[in-house]
Image (tube, grey):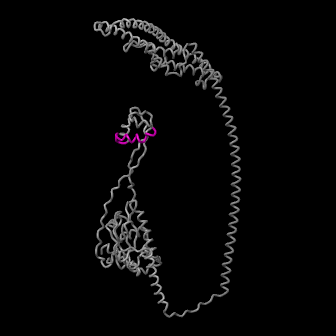
Amino acid sequence: MKRSGLFLSLLLAIILSNPAAEPVFASTADPFSVQSGTNAAVNESVAAKEEVPAAPVAEAPKEEEKPATVTEIAKHTVQSGDSLWRIAQKLLGDGNRYREIIEANKAKYPSLEKNPDLIFAGWELEVPVEKEVKPATDQKPTEPAKEEATKPEPKVEKENAVPAEQVTNLPQWSTEEKVKKLQSALDSANRALLAQKKRIADLNEQTIRFLIDNKFMTEEEWMAMNPPEGYTYRLDRVGKIELVGSDNKPLTNADMASLDKKAKEAAKTTTQKETTKPATEVKPVKETKDSQADADAKSKQEAHDKAVKEAKEKAAKEKADKAAAEKSAKEKAEADKKAAAEKAAKEKVEAEKAAKEKAAAEAAAKEAEKVAETRYQKMLGEIGAPDLADKRSDYYKAIKNGSDLLSKGFFGGTTSFYKFVNAYDFPEYDIPSLQRDLRESQKNYEKAIDKDKTSRTLGIFGDTIESAGKKVEQSRARLEKAWKELGKALDESKAKAKELESNVTSNKSKAATVQKELDKLDKYDSKNASEVQKLSKEVKEINDKIKDDEEKLANYKELKRVFKI
């Protein structure tokens, strides 16, 4: 016997054993297809054709799952050499999409709309980047949703079917309740199949078995759900269950209520006919003795009184326990509050004390630094150097101006400022660093005196008053040596500046004299062309020399300002 025929025989034997039910199945190419909308059909000849093999079920083509996309905002800090085109090429994969970056950032940087070619290093740009989100593919499909071929169907012979008489206590539902129960089971199954993008699109032996095997309903519930005689279930296009008759029209709730009413009236008529039969003689029941009744009543009353007493005692105990717990909690809360207040007061006193000590220490430190700074400035005055310890930028700019002032052209060789420009190669001529060393040495010396440091920690760590004083003298000696060398370069610059000033004055006078001779000539008379050419060239050369000398004098002014010469 074919497996499908055996399965149908078993299911029909169960359903047909109930005289009020009729087997109903509807078939479709794929009962789990999302696109199926096939109407149900009444298969009245299944039981008679047990040996006919079931038609193969065609699989519906699976829709390719397209990955979803989400837009994320990527942050990009503009670097030197960046452009909107390059940023779009890097983050969006296409430089021509730079307009998207403009739209996303024009509120923050309005200049982007008018001049997208001009962006500045340090700008924080927001770039909307689309990313694909792959659908979850690791979710295991519901086991019963596999094709029947992958799960062997048990062989059940017809004579092994369970008669409906042996199934007791079947729910007694109205027709409308049956439809609702079946709809609920179907909806639960469809929610389970949602992860596989499938749904049940037809009611047949395969889908009914799927609902039962996966516990969406039981065998007894399905037997109780059988429709009235002459009617069948089907699914509409949106997955709603309809009850239809021979005219293939769905019944309304009112129609189903009318069917139930007629069935009840028919059952009532049958019952009345059975009650018209002669009644059998009923023997009187022997009355219970009064003593036994009194004993039972007394026992029940005692049990009741005992239960009431125990309940009262339990309630009183719970009340007392609750009151004790509340009291204990209140006392604990008060103790905690008091301890917290005492702790806060103690912490406040300690904090105020620490703040005073810190303020006193800071004041003492500031006073010590002030004294050390005064002595440091005094030493600089004795050396004749301005304070450049914290003005390294001005220092190097002035040194460059001095080099330009003394420079004799591209191949003019090095100047007297060479050692002061290359601090890495000549650290002994780094004036700002030497001045900072002198200042720190003076501070450490005064600290050693204040702390009366006459010995080192473990004999090797730290400074004594004597060693700290020696470091001050050494730092001062190094600074004096470097400043003397710089003084030579400054003196050379001063002499050069004086020479340039003299040249400028002389050349201006010479240029004026030549210009007067040129002005006397008729420039537009060709006879004077040779003389005009000569004088014009001479005026231009003198003015160029004046300009070069004045530019070098400007370098000296900056040198003079920084080094106070």
Counting from the top left corner in percent of width and height, residue 529 is at 29, 8
Residue 229 seen from this side: yes
Quadrant of the rendering where the N terminus is positioned: bottom left
Residue nearest the observer in this picture, 384 or 282 = 384
329 relative to 400 in the view: left or right: right
- Magenta-highlighted residues: 92-108
User: Where, by quadrant of the figure, is residue 252 drawn?
Assistant: bottom left
Residue nearest the observer in this picture, 446 or 256 = 256
Could you tell me which residue is drawn at 71 percent across and 49 percent down? 335
376 relative to 313 in the view: left or right: left
Residue 454 seen from this side: no
236 relative to 463 in the view: left or right: left
Q: How many marks?
A: 0
**In this picture, is 565 found above or below 261?**
above
**In this picture, is 137 found above or below 565?**
below
Counting from the top left corner in percent of width and height, residue 33 is at 34, 64
Asked if the magenta segment contains residue 471, the reply would be no
Asked if the magenta segment contains residue 99, the reply would be yes
**In this picture, is 409 found above or below 115?**
above
Could you tell me which residue is drawn at 40 percent across and 49 percent down? 70
Counting from the top left corner in percent of width and height, residue 241 is at 40, 70
Dominant secondary structure (helix, strand or loop) of the stretch shown in magenta: helix
Could you tell me which residue is drawn at 41 percent across and 37 percent down? 112
Residue nearest the observer in this picture, 537 or 161 = 537
User: Where, by quadrant of the figure, is residue 508 drawn?
Assistant: top left
Counting from the top left corner in percent of width and height, residue 394 is at 50, 20
